[in-house]
Image: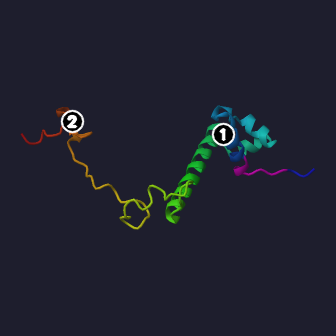
Amino acid sequence: MPRTTFTDADFLAAACALAAKRGPAAVTVESVTARLKAPTGSFYYRFASRDVLLGELWLTTARAFQEGFIAAIATGRRTRCGAPHPHLGARPSKRGTGLPAPSPRRFRPGRVAGRAAPRSCGAGTARR
């Protein structure tokens, strides 16, 4: 019988499926290797521990989301209902990045949530 080879992506996909179905607590070395019918040593050859696997899964998922989000902004893709995306075209882009320009409101030192900062913060103590 030919020997099955596994990749990092196989282990990540199995962990992702288990986490989506039963939550991150269900992702164990045993459950991932059982899902793939892979030897435990194959898992440990690629990942030092369960935590390393979940960290890699988190980074891979976040990176894929960000790449998709940036691509959607760059292409001007519309929302599911067909309306333009609310962040697209709201204001002209400041630097040609496709992202909305920053808000015209400016940071005002010595202010906290629209109120004057308390004296203990050091705001307004320089001049008396």
Q: Nearer the viewer, mark 2 or mark 1?
A: 1
Q: Position of residue 97 (x, y in %)?
A: 43, 65
Image quarter where the C terminus lies is top left
Q: Amino acid at mark 2?
A: Cys
Q: Is residue 119 above or below residue 56?
A: above
The structure residue drawn at horizontal position 41% and vertical position 68%, both measured from the top left corner, is 96
Choose between 87 and 41: the one closer to the eye: 87
Mark 1 lies on a secondary structure that is helix
Above-or-below relation of 111 to 96: above
> Residue sitting at 59 percent across and 49 percent down?
61
Instruction: List the residue tagged with mark 2.
Output: 121
Q: Which of 37 and 19 lies nearest the eye of the viewer?
A: 19
Amino acid type shown at disc 1: Ala
Nearer the N terminus, badge 2 or badge 1?
1
Q: Position of residue 126 (x, y in %)?
A: 11, 42
1 relative position to 43: left or right: right
Whether residue 4 sits left or right of residue 86 in the image: it is right
Q: CA distance from mark 2 to mark 1?
A: 45 Å
Image coordinates of residue 22 in percent, x first then y, are 68, 34
Q: Which mark is residue 20?
A: 1
Q: Residue at x 45, y 60 (%)?
A: 88
Of 11 and 117, nearer the camera is 117
What residue range appears in magenta?
A: 4-10
